[in-house]
Structures are given as structure tokens and as C-alpha cells.
Amino acid sequence: MTSLPITLTINGLRHDLEIEPRVTLLDLLRERLDLTGTKKGCDRGQCGACTVLVDGRRVNSCLALAVSHDGAEILTIEGVAQGEDLHPVQAAFIAHDGFQCGFCTPGQIMSTLGLIAEGQAGDDPERIREGLSGNLCRCAAYGGIVEAVLEAQQNMAKSDRRTAA
Amino acid sequence: MKDFSYIRAATADAARQAAALPGAMLLAGGTTLIDLAKCGVAKPDSLIDITHLNGLDRIEVDERGATIGALAKMSHVADHAGIKSQFPAISEALWQAASAQIRNMATIGGNLMQRTRCPYFRDPANFPACNKRNPGSGCSAIGGVTRGHAVLGTSEACIATYPGDLAAALVAFDAMIHLGERRISVDAFFLLPGSTPDREHAMEPGEMITAIEIPASATARRSTYVKIRDRQSYEFAAASAAVGIEFEPDGRTIRDLRVALGGVATKPWRARAVEDALKGKVLEPEAIRAASLLAVEGAVDHGANRYKIELAPRVVARAILKLGETT
């Protein structure tokens, strides 16, 4: 099928691309742009390993056709740290052992960024578990993940207060 | 996933016309369609992308009711202040559906159009027989593993469960679907499988869901959605109930009641027998439990799904009693 021209801004960089209509955002990131931090787990929207932010909101990139997101701003795990400085969510996942094998971790972190931006979870572990239920961890590092999200939220709120002051 | 062509619709009318052509399908959030294309169930020749249309994602709530554009995302509707206050069961049904990622992608129109989770339907390579996919080929589910299959509204041709939560809440409160030039009730929109389970909706070629309209009511304002499932989150219902209640001024006598079931029937299932049995009665646990049994009148099991016949009335009773506790 004919390739179509689209423009995506990925981690702040503009990309002018020609793609087949059936290419998912996930396959575009991994196979065309070598952004392999975003993982392909189930490829059916059931595991969350492929989570990225599209225009600031978390989505399953395996269920998104890239061509349909022409003009969107995409944030992947590669765009989260500032150079060598880890994002507070990344640092908290390390501090709290929020992973074992690490395969689901990019999706967990992107989903956490979405959750914090939505402002729905607060400091309630039960609501964090509910809010992250779209991200499976086969190593079952859930205990550490919830602790990491709690701490990251607190640290980000503190730093927001400092910035505001 | 099979190759297809892609058309970005410029207007809703152009989209409806393009989607009427053979092999064409509308693309909104894609959470059902792309999944089913990967399973080999959906094989579109062309996709008509409607996500770039303007104005179809509005949510308006006033004293007459709510109008929700077909392209509003599940997450936006669930979090809308007017929906939460005037239609809590709608918001709760959406919050308890899918995952946060999918709620950010999936649209309200697409949510209604989601297909069954019947594992035989979803696996054409291993189960060629499916009357929904391939009319006349038979049903692989009957005599198979039926734990998730329907107990209400089934036929000899199909026992697939309609999986959606939102539609159960909509059918309880007499919601209407806008199809461009005409409107149809949610109840009439969804068809029983009968001998033609491939035909799931009363939509004609060239029609497209443009909005959902929910009339305001006292029952909708005092409503809830109770969903029981195998895991606590990100799972389809084993049985669910959308319930709304209005009391007489005494605060105990039921003036009006709405009950609909999810997860147990081939379409969103209004349980009018429960409503009729309890209107005019005082809210009292024994009477509620007895009347809730009417929700599964005529239910037929296929072995492993028998538990749903016992579970569904309990979910209905729990939802009614929960509403009775709040004042």
C-alpha cells in the first residue's frame, strides 16, 4: 500500500516520515526510529509495555496507528531523563526496586508519568494500583512499583513547591 | 495485520459515505479494531479515520440531560463534572472499564461498537466455526469452554457476551444514540443474536454514531455501577449491574427504579421485571434480594457459566442496597 507522509514530534524532535497505513506507533518507534526503549509485550493492548505519552496522555502504542496520529507530540522513555539526570520517577523506581527483569519498566514509568499528570491517584496506594492496572509486571515487582510512585509524587510535589516559591 | 488503504475523513458526512463502501471500516480510537485486525478477525480493505473531525468530542450536560459526542474519550467522559454529578453510574461504568491507557484512546462511539470477547470469535485460525464471523459455520463456544459466555439472550447460533460496561449503564437510563439523521434507543440499537449473530446493531450502511443522549432523571442522579470480576481491575465483568433509584418523600418507598445487567447477556440487558416488582415497595433487604432473582428470568447456562445465574441477582441486590444506604 502507498506510504503516506506524516509529521510527529518525538521527544522534542520533529520527524517527517513516510509510512504505510498499517504501521503502529510502536513499530514505527522501534523498527524505523530505533527507539527500542518502548517494548513490545503482548502487542494487543493487554500488558502496557508499549505505553508512551501522546499529547501528554498515556496510550498503548501497539494499538495506535502512526498515520492517525499525524501532528502529535510523543514522549517515550528515551525522552524522560534530562541528559545524565534521571527523572524523579526513574530515580524512585531504582531506589525502591520497582523492577526485576526490567522489560515492563519503560511502560511502567511512562504510565506513572501519565498517572501523576492526571492527578487522580493522590497518595493512596490502592488508587495507584488501580491507576496502573494497565501495566503488567510478570516479575510481580508491584510492591516496589507502588512505593516508587508514592515517593516520586512526593518529590515532584516538593520540587513544584520550591519552583513556585 | 493485512494491508489496507487509509482515508482521513474531512467531514462526518464524507466519513459515513466512505464507510458504506464494501470493505471499508471507520477508525476512531482503534483499541478494538487494531486488536481484531491483528487477531485476523477484522480484515478491512480501507480505514476511514474520523479522529480528526472537529466538534464530535463535545460533552454537554444541562437540566435536560447529557449529550456526549461520539469521539469523546472514555477518560474525559468518566472525569466530566456534570456526568459525575448527574449520571454517576455512567462515570463509574467507564472508570471500571479497561485500563487508563485504553480509556485515553477509546471513544464513546467506539466503546458501544466493541466486539465480544468470546475466545472462539477472536481466534479464527484455530476455530473456523463462528456464526458471528462466518454466518452458517456453526458455534465453537457451544460445547466448549463457556465460563465467560452469556446466560441471557442466547440462541442456538451464538452465546457470545456483549462485553461493554457503558452500554449497560446507558440502557438503564433510556439513552438514545444519534445516527446522523435519526435517533434510536440504546436498547433497540443492540440486536439479539437469534439466527443472525453477525448482525449486532440496527445501523444501516452509511450510518455512523455521532452522539449519545441521556435524559436527566432522578434515578440517574442517584445511580451506581457495581462490577464483579475475576481480578480487581482491568477485567471484563463476570456480572455487573447499573442501578438507579428514586424514593418517595418518605425516603424509604421506591418511586422509580432502573436496573440493567452487564457481562451476562448477548446485549446490554434491561431488567424491567426487577424494576416493576419493586416500584412502590419499601426498601428492605429481603424484598430486594427476592425481586433481584427476576433479573435472570429465562436464563440458560452452558455448563461453566452457570455461576452467572446465581451471581447476577446478587450483584443487582448489592447495587440497590448500596444506593439505599446513601442519603
Image (cartoon, helix red, strand yellow):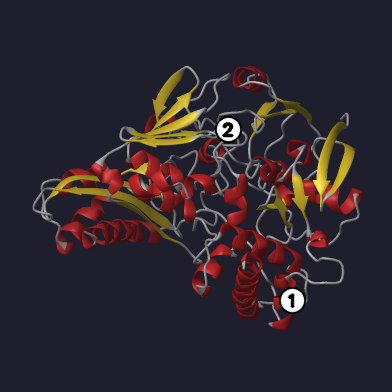
Residue occupying the far left of the picture? B250
Residue located at (61% from left, 28% from top): B54
Mark 1 element type? helix
Q: Position of residue B10 (x, y in %)?
A: 68, 22
Name the quadrant containing residue B218: top left
> What residue did someone put label 2 on?
B136
Q: Is residue B198 left or right of residue A35?
A: left
Q: Nearer the viewer, residue B126 or B199?
A: B199
Up/down of A19 relative to B248, above or below: above
Taking depth in this image into account, of A17 and B243 the one nearest to the observer is: A17
**Mark 2: few/some/many CA within 10 Å (<14, 14-19, 20+):** some
Q: Chain of mark 1?
A: A
Q: Position of residue A120 (x, y in %)?
A: 52, 61
Residue B116 percent across, percent down from the top left? 54, 45
Disc 2 marks a residue whose amino acid type is Gly
Disc 1 packing (10 Å; few <14; some 14–19; many ≥20): some
Circle 1 residue: A91
Specify whether A11 is left or right of B284.
Answer: right
Asked whether, in this view, residue A36 is left or right of residue A89, the answer is: right
Inspect this view and state whether residue B1 appears: no
> Is there one chain holding both mark 1 and mark 2?
no
Screen quadrant of the N terminus of chain A: top right
B313 up-or-down from B204: above or below: below
Query: In screen coordinates, is B76 left or right of B287?
Result: right
Q: How many marks?
A: 2
Separation of residues labelled 1 and 2 (CA atoms): 57 Å
